[in-house]
Image: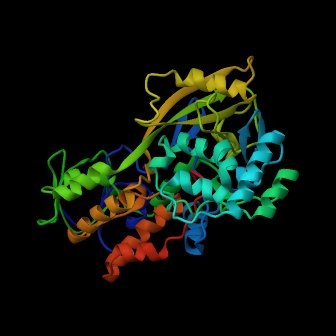
Amino acid sequence: MRTDTLILGGGLAGLSAAYHSDREYRILERESRVGGLCRTNWYDGFGFDLSIHILFTKQPELARLICDELLAGRYHDHTRSSWVYSHGRYTGYPFQSSLYGLPVDVATDCLLGLIEAHRTPPTETPANFAEWARATFGDGIAKHFFLPYNERVWATPPEQMDYRWIADRVAIPDLATTVRGALEPPTIRWGPNSSFWYPEEGGIEALPRGLMAGLDPERVELETEVASIEPSRRTVTTTAGATIEYDDLISSLPLPVLVRMVADAPERVREAAAQLRWNTVYTVMIGVRREAISDHHWVYFHEDQFTFHRISFPMNFSPTLAPPGCSSIMAEISHSAHRDMSGRDLVAETIAGLQLAGVLREKDEIVFARVAPIAPAYVIYTLDHESAVGTILEWLQELEIHTVGRFGEWQYFNMDQAIGSGRDAVRALEDGRVIGLVAAEELEVTATLTSG
């Protein structure tokens, strides 16, 4: 077999590359359906995405593509309702500009810390994420929310993480805004996802289905796993023994996996791949026989009495995600070597936490409960992340293997960025340009406080 453009992985980036291609393409996807992490699973009439997925973008072209083409105008336009549960009460989001309602001593500590941070800015560049958080928000906000929450969501000590990836992605209100947010309920919704879109039907999987509708299904090979890549011969071999020749190769596979597939990778590249870190997220999905259990979209939790770091209510994204008279809850729990969640009864711990927060009542009837792992879920920006990823991508570029998407570029991409990554890659190839340079110039940062 032979094709002009061979695409490894049928997630959003890979599908987008094929969708925007004017040449012959072929997609190899290991799973039984496309979408990658952008999928929706159904159980007893309840629909659950793989973690929270919402749609927003700053790029007009991508907005038209998502809303008009892929979803064909069938989407809900939401105003975000997101909160932080802290000290037994719900406060606004983001925490740093929504101190109203917190205990007086906590709010005071946060304000004084921020004032001190403004008064005495650091004289040296922060060495890690923890130092950056304290220098930016002060010791109070860092202690009472920012650092404990981020350690839970990334399952990594903030002292072992870089901060440059998030410095331009976090709402940093001025001092006056923070003071006002401590004196009265917040009136401003921060962040690019203050409003967002969500498909009317089918859950978030409506998005990859929209991309698939523009592709030739005969060119998308499901349940096909790659075994090896020989760049010198421009061939890919599958685990079933098939060999495919290509002119151009685009991969959205996780970088550590991709490096193992390429024969004779140099030691420096193998060492760089071994440095890459990621976490696993367990999603606990619960169906409750009580309607309108909450009017929130999602809530952040940073305190140790809760196993989960975030809960969401899928039925508030689209009413089609829960049967009539029922509500749905999804809790997210991060796991890594630093925060081992294996062997625990995550359903029981989640239900106990939801009761503690007043979301569930003891008499509520749980009609469905299940745990599903996502691995890898988030790439971790360790202190050596930039150098390790740079070493790998430079080598892959020499081999003319072009990488796209969250795990192909090993970056924290939202869905619009993943779609844009695949689009830009195929356009660059067809124009004879260097892919990496185009992606770096055109992609816009659209993430929010912690996990998009």
Q: Is residue 300 left or right of residue 209?
A: right
State the residue at coordinates (35%, 74%).
Answer: 435
Find residue 16 and report its horizontal and vertical position in percent.
43, 64
Q: Is residue 206 visible?
A: no
Q: In this orientation, does residue 56 appear?
A: yes
Specify the quadrant that holds the N terminus. Answer: bottom left
Q: Where is residue 197 in the image (x, y as percent from the top left)?
A: 65, 57
Position above or below: 328 against 445 = above
- In this rendering, the answer to whether 326 lies above or below 20 is above
Residue 316 relative to residue 222: left or right: right
Along the viewing direction, whichever of 327 and 270 lies nearer the viewer = 270
Identify the residue at image location x=76%, y=37%. 294
Position of 287 with respect to 436 (left or right) is right
Task: Out of 114 and 221, give the one closest to the viewer.
Answer: 114
301 w.r.t. 142: above or below: above
Percent of width and height locating residue 133: 59, 54
Could you tell me which residue is drawn at 11 percent across and 65 percent down? Answer: 233
Residue 336: % across, % down = 43, 37
Observer-nearest of 104 and 366: 104
The answer to which image quadrant residue 250 occupies is: bottom left
69 relative to 2 in the view: left or right:
right
- Which residue shows up at 78% across the image and 57% down it? 178
Foreground of the two, 438 or 92: 92
